[in-house]
Image (tube, rainbow, N blue to C red):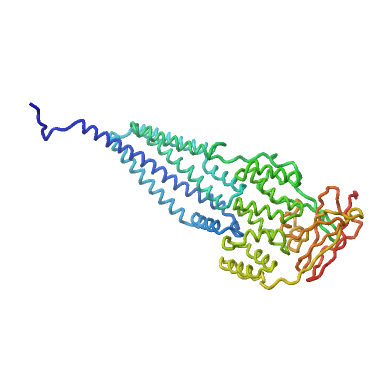
Amino acid sequence: MVDEARPWQVDVGRLRRAHAVHTVMLQVIFILLVLIAGAVAGLATATVATREVVEALDEPGASAGLLEWDQFRALRAMREYYGGGSSTYHAVVLGGLGTIFLVLALTVRRRLLPDGVSRRRLVLTLVAVAATYVFFLVVADPFEEVGRRVALDRHLLMPVSAEWTDAVETSFLMQVPLAAAVLAVAFAALTPTRIALPGLGAVAGLGFALVLLCRVPWGPLARPPEPAESVLAGQPRAVRVLVAGDVPRVARGVLPDVGLASVPPPVGAEAEAAAAKAVATWGLGDLRGATAARLHALEPLARFDPGESARRLVALYQRTRDNEILGRLAAGLRGPAPGGAADAVLDAIADLSRFHLGSAALDVCRARVARGELDLAAKTKDAARAEGVDAKVLDACSLAPPGPRGALQGTVTLDGRSAPGIALALLDQTAAAAVDAAPEGGFDLSAIAGAPTARTDDTGAWHVAGLPSGRYRVVVLLEDARLGPDRHAAGPAGWVVVEAGGTASVTPIALTTRLE
């Protein structure tokens, strides 16, 4: 006879299975709560840290000039969020949420360990957690790492918006797993159960591994180290320039800093070839390649070829969308007359709807007027006015058709004979003032980025047409180290006047190889 189950009897096996499932679910919930609490706490910390980074990156005038509209909007949004009170408010909210999840995790832990934890064990756990946190802060140093990456990114060819984004991502990448890992260590020490202990141990290990991967010089999270001083060094930094005038003087013209203070930009054909090779070897994502790319683009200024420099800068900008390159391109618009440099720049920014002009609006407008493109110049003024550019600044760009142009011509002699192949530039009053005010180290060759240039022909003659009326100063490039001014011969006056529709002749410029 089979015994019938009575209503008060209990299936002990089923209860045990149900209790085991319930315990597992509680432990899984516990692990998730720990993860969420750590992640939220890390988000709050990263938000505060990122605000400091963005404030450090937000230099005055960083986005005041020529900039693509998408970059400008991204920078403006990031500046408003982290520079205002929104990020602080959200950090406080995240901190409160982290506390709530932490309390929930503690509640679940009490369900798992009804007998509680001894005071001695709790104190030892807190000491271990504090020691672990301090140890990894010292070893990983997330704040220093974010600053280092920002400093390195500034030398890479990338938009400023990308630099800021990388700083934000790095801050969150390091702070969030670090906070989650420290919390996981604490709860793993307080919860010696079968599931929670290995689960939280894995979380802690993964978090610490992610933080440390940002510090090693290899792997997907690594950044290239700063190269040694010998990467591109080896050639002299400056070129010798003769500033013609009543008392001719030899000045130094230097290429602008291309990214690394420890690597002076060399000048010369060999250096240019080495820079092109370095770009091909390292690529633009490496500090060495990015430095070489800037040098390769600016090198033509050292031989008075601003048109070629502008074309290289345009090609580099098209590859990188770096607003620093746009800033250097804008310098090619500031010359007295349109030429190879201005044409290349205007062609690159032909679609005005893509660009926020900012302080470069006046240069763009004047360059358009100089080329006779009055309709485009008017659109430039309208776009700049809509962006909030001061109307008084825009009034300096007159939409009147350009008047008749003038020309300058002259000759260069070397020890009394014709001097072919001599490069020279004509500086307007603004560029000449920059040369005159240059420190002893030399004037920035970017001053001639928009200047009309020429080379003497086989007879030593040179000619520059299409000049607006005004005063100009002649500057001669002394490419040969043996060349210098012949102080016994009369030279051109300090300023040469060009009249509308006329051609002015300059007194021959005399060079010599004789030591004086």
Q: Residue furthest left?
A: 1
Q: Is residue 232 visible?
A: yes
Q: Residue furthest front?
A: 458
Q: Residue furthest top?
A: 1
Point out residue 339 in the picture as x, y percentages from the top left corner. Answer: 72, 61
At 46% from the left and 53% from the top, the residue drawn is: 87
Q: Nearer the viewer, residue 311 or 191?
A: 311
Q: Is residue 393 visible?
A: no
At 73% from the left and 44% from the top, the residue drawn is: 271
Quarter-wise, where is residue 29 in the image? Answer: top left
Point out residue 99 in the picture as x, y percentages from the top left corner. Answer: 37, 46
| Position of 271 relative to 185 (above/below) | below
Q: Quadrant of the N terminus?
A: top left
Tell me: 121 left or right of 496: left
Point out residue 415 in the picture as x, y percentages from the top left corner. Answer: 91, 53
Point out residue 28 in the picture as x, y percentages from the top left corner. Answer: 33, 38
At 39% from the left and 41% from the top, the residue drawn is: 35
Tell me: 191 left or right of 383: left
Tell me: 420 left or right of 220: right
Image mark count = 0
At 45% from the left and 41% from the top, the residue drawn is: 177
